């Protein structure tokens, strides 16, 4: 009920603070007999790590995942998987200066109001660090969905107001920003560097594409697949909007424009984004999320402290300029977790 | 797990098909001692009823709610509330013609794929009729949130591409479309009538405004208040996008533009939409949803039937032209249910 | 969270008070395509009805079940089943005399303490009437378990201290008390009549036998099949003890006596009661429950009222002398619900 | 859904196998601001450790608990507590001989049937080792219930057929067997030693006494406090029966004997065991559980192996002769977890 779990059958529970000893995740409900070792998971963990680009955080987190339970001789046993990621290179002193100050755009103020106590070091539980555990769980979820022929890929559509002009999936892995348009990618990098020089940050838009999804996944009323995907993605700290298929553009369409005609070959268009009445229709699922700019900026900002006194704050730590591209594997993880869960839910009623 | 429930403490379970004997809702977890009678609920039910305007469905549903359990002498007792709404004026024969045809934009195809069987009469469980039960539950939820000083109001921001120019809350109740800008309202009506004449339908954008919400509601990781609101709203059949605060606009901002400065008087702006790190900050919660056009249109559409043969379909029944304004009380209900649930969740840990 | 639901995949939620308009149950998660009509359910309902024997309640409840949603043309559709049982022959005036008095052995005192308000008519939600909804849900669950070759039968082992001498399953349906030993049955009836004449009541022991259960059902740690069965049975108002297999006798055994040897033909004994480490082993599941005597007795009892004043109370209503035999179908229902749920849970991981 | 969690608000999820790297528990929903450090937990862990008596396992498990997340400066923060206990002194080779053999009385056969794969080392997840994590969680739960004035104490009532003659709570801590009757304690030890010499094992009965519990805890229908306690206790591997208050004796009573009269001073008797209609009545909660003898015995037993060939097995490892007394803190833990959960559930509706 305290909200650190997601999923019904494939249930993921994360724990850990930014500057605690470790973060981790327990996955309860993983099917038995799946090949799983640490290197399977590490691949995605490495994609989430702070990069080496100019606009990325210099903090070094090796993010080494250890499987502590739930596998035997390289296979899952059906018992809970416990994955642990030690926090290395944690410099708590960086944060002492702001322990009584509520940083704008952060959870400092709201955690204080909710709990009356908070671990102020690096954002504690509200830190982006928490997403490491999500990515680890997502890597396990991917095993389940890949076995069903489903693949999930996320990429950058927009950074700092610069949008891609085209989507070429093969470009994604060829640039640091996971941009499906190599040309735009360079422009985006430039914009990020510019923001960094100003001590500022930038937002962006990520699109997630699910291919090979069978029809019939999703529960029709409250646990519609798009509702669960919206929740899973909106639960990433930085996300302020989610849309599926035609999304907000659907609001301006007529029914005859928006309805996807059905042919013997399948759907003629995909305004639905692969989901009808909350259930997958077999077409690609296409989702976009809006990411706000990273809240931690060096630029001076007006705020108050715990005694309600006005303060000016400049957040100096080691921060990224944008959640893009590090959020990309997190998006893939959340979508994979939701799909793995719904695949297993559907099995229960068949 | 089959997804007909929402909420953890204040738990709402709906049941019923469009053309069954009745629809209803069970609310488990309503606090005892709340004054509640049928007229409290009926008020919102009446707002969801098919109107009398030209662009609205002529089907007459009286939507009379009966409280069958959970109250005693006009007060809730803490036991489950069972609310039942009989389905009147149900003409099943209207639907016989299309029982083997998958209507574009509808759940016909996906229900068939998921269950291998479906109640084709009027969309069955996928019908907008299901939202009657949500509105009934929402009316109970409102009792809980009003007692905390919270109010929820939803209104139309856009219909068929026509947007409001201003937001005057007092206008909302003065026009059929719940538009906070009387001038635009007339234009919207005209657009709706035009679409009706063409046998087509229109989408729109609804904004929901929550005032008086205390800080501290929401769970920080997966059950962020904005994640739960996104799910609740996305679970309404017609919704293709949800955004909070600055929403998709945040993607184009810099951190220094997007972060809301904090002063001793409160937040200077509200790009956050009242939520920081998944927890309410005491400011207004502002959410927008994108509604696709109603899928049932008279215009001819290309589709297939259950034997995979090509078909042309024209959906003749009695349908609205737009989910606006009937979706307005549904949005208020879903937001109220989420807030009532999180108020009670927060009580548990205090 | 308010505890009116049981089951994870096959989820049963009951509602209704003894003297409200109706009681009912919503089953969310029933698989689609199951043949189901009201007469399937009515059969078990009739077994729970007040009988005509001397020791049974003269109150006439016809307990007519109506399926209000979730089926189409005689088959389940996968959407929620809503089953409603109208309360007929409700004489509220019977209870006015004791509305401020806490009847010993009843929930009057504890409901008052928990909620600060209670529906005192006939026990309200705490009434045995609530079990009508359980039996209705159990009849649906039986459809699922029968399809897997599982059968559940409950019978009386003891009433008022009189135990069966033998267990002959064919005897069960041949006497009103569902006693598997016709000879003992007559003795039990006599003891019940004697208690009735004294204005007193009696307890008893019921045994539930599950045959044909496949191995592999149950989750190994907290949701062990025996743990879930214990909870389901202990949740019946009158039950004060549950044991499985050798039960309390196991406490006095040595390991070499208690462990069931395994042979190529199966287990040589069944001290385990069909469950090892919380998972079914393919052998019969054997459970016994202890039922306390019915709390409502005409004999004068010492108590207090809502103002903490001493009172003497004699509960005059129309009450049974023992929960046996009416609890028999309730036990079968609870066990069937747990098994149906675990069958579906196991499907999800296969 | 895979059953490794218990509790709704105070939610406990355990993970880990007997011979894996570690076992652990995540507690989601612990209130913020509670003083908590490792030594608070260690005290109960030490009570569960293998003792030094003749009849106890010589395997040395130091069971050192580490708090890895969820506290800050010695207080809980409201975020998930992750407690980890490293497995030390694990000798996997002890178990190689029996990896293909299904030990009678163990979960070997049922795990194999359920999952098709199992970690055979020391029972894997089915090992009593799993209860270490429960005890750690129970120590946290005790912090919550102690703050409400509730105390939980468990003690031995019977071992190998020898019952206590009296209950003197002060005796419990004065003998290794947690027996509330010092005289009987010596007799019990003797019986245990005798069984050990024979290579056999013994069962027993444990009673749990909850004092200071306020009235009003428990949910009235399926989540009755006694139902949840029964489940929690039955989920301990060795338990074959649970009874509350008069328990199985109630079956032989008349209503006038069994109903506890209510006076202005409280209840005159406690046949109810502190629970009426599933809700605590303010009196002591009294529960008894039946423990079967430990399944691992040196005595030769008949069984089969994974190829269905007959085998004779003698389980040689380092095993206790009885779960008593090591199960005592496990019982206290499970009861404390259920009570902490229901205290918080009740707060949500007040």
Image (cartoon, coloured by chain):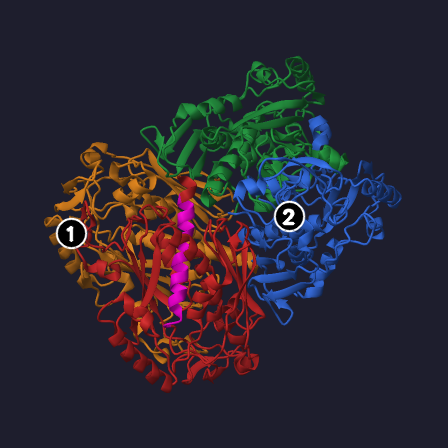
Chain colours: A green, B blue, C red, D orange
Q: Which residues are magenta?
A: C324-346
For image coordinates 66% across by 26% down, the residue present is A205
How far apart, in angstroms, are the residues tagged by discs 2 and 1? 62 Å
- Is residue C331 one of those drawn in magenta? yes
A72 up-or-down from C125: above or below: above
For image coordinates 42% across by 31% down, the residue present is A84
Quarter occupied by the C terminus of chain C: top left
Label 1 neighbour load within 10 Å: few <14, some 14-19, many 20+: many
Q: Is residue C348 visible?
A: yes
Quadrant of the image occupied by residue A25: top left
Give the x, y percent position of residue A289. 64, 31
Give the x, y percent position of residue B242. 68, 38
Secondary structure at numbered mark 2 = helix
The reply, left or right, for residue D226 in relation to residue A182 is left
Q: Is residue D13 visible?
A: no
Front residue of A281 and D213: A281
Front residue of D93 and B293: B293
Residue occupied by mark 2: B123
Q: Are marks 2 and 1 in contact (CB under 8 Å)?
A: no
Residue occupied by mark 1: C256
For image coordinates 31% across by 34% down, the residue present is D20
Secondary structure at numbered mark 1 = helix
């Amino acid at each position: 009920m305290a909200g650190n779990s997601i999923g019904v059958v494939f249930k993921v529970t994360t724990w850990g603070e930014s500057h605690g000893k470790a973060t981790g995740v327990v996955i309860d409900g993983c099917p038995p007999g799946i090949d799983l070792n640490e290197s399977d998971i590490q691949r995605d963990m490495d994609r989430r790590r702070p990069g080496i680009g100019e606009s990325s955080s210099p903090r070094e987190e090796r993010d080494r995942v250890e499987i502590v339970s739930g596998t035997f001789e390289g296979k899952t046993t059906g018992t809970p998987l416990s994955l642990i990621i030690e926090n290395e290179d944690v410099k708590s002193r960086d944060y002492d200066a702001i322990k009584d100050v509520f940083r704008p755009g952060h959870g400092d103020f709201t955690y204080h109001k909710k709990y009356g106590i908070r671990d102020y070091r690096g954002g504690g539980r509200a830190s982006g660090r928490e997403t490491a555990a999500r990515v680890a769980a997502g890597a396990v979820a991917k095993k389940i969905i890949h076995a069903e022929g489903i693949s999930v890929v996320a990429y950058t559509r927009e950074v700092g107001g610069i949008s891609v002009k085209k989507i070429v999936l093969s470009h994604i892995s060829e640039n640091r920003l996971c941009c499906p348009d190599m040309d735009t990618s360079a422009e985006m990098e430039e914009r990020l560097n510019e923001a960094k020089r100003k001590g500022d940050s930038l937002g962006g838009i990520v699109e997630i594409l699910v291919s090979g999804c069978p029809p019939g996944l999703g529960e029709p009323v409250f646990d519609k697949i798009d509702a669960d995907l919206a929740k899973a993605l909106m639960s990433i700290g930085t996300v302020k909007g989610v849309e599926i298929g035609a999304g907000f553009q659907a609001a301006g369409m007529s029914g005859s424009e928006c309805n996807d005609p059905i042919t013997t070959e399948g759907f003629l268009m995909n305004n639905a984004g692969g989901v009808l009445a909350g259930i997958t229709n077999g077409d690609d699922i296409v989702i976009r999320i809006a990411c706000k700019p990273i809240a931690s900026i060096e630029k001076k900002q007006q705020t108050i402290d715990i005694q309600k006194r006005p303060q000016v704050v400049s957040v100096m730590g080691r921060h990224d300029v944008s959640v893009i591209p590090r959020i990309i594997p997190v998006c893939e993880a959340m979508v994979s977790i939701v799909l793995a869960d719904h695949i297993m839910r559907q099995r229960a009623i068949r």
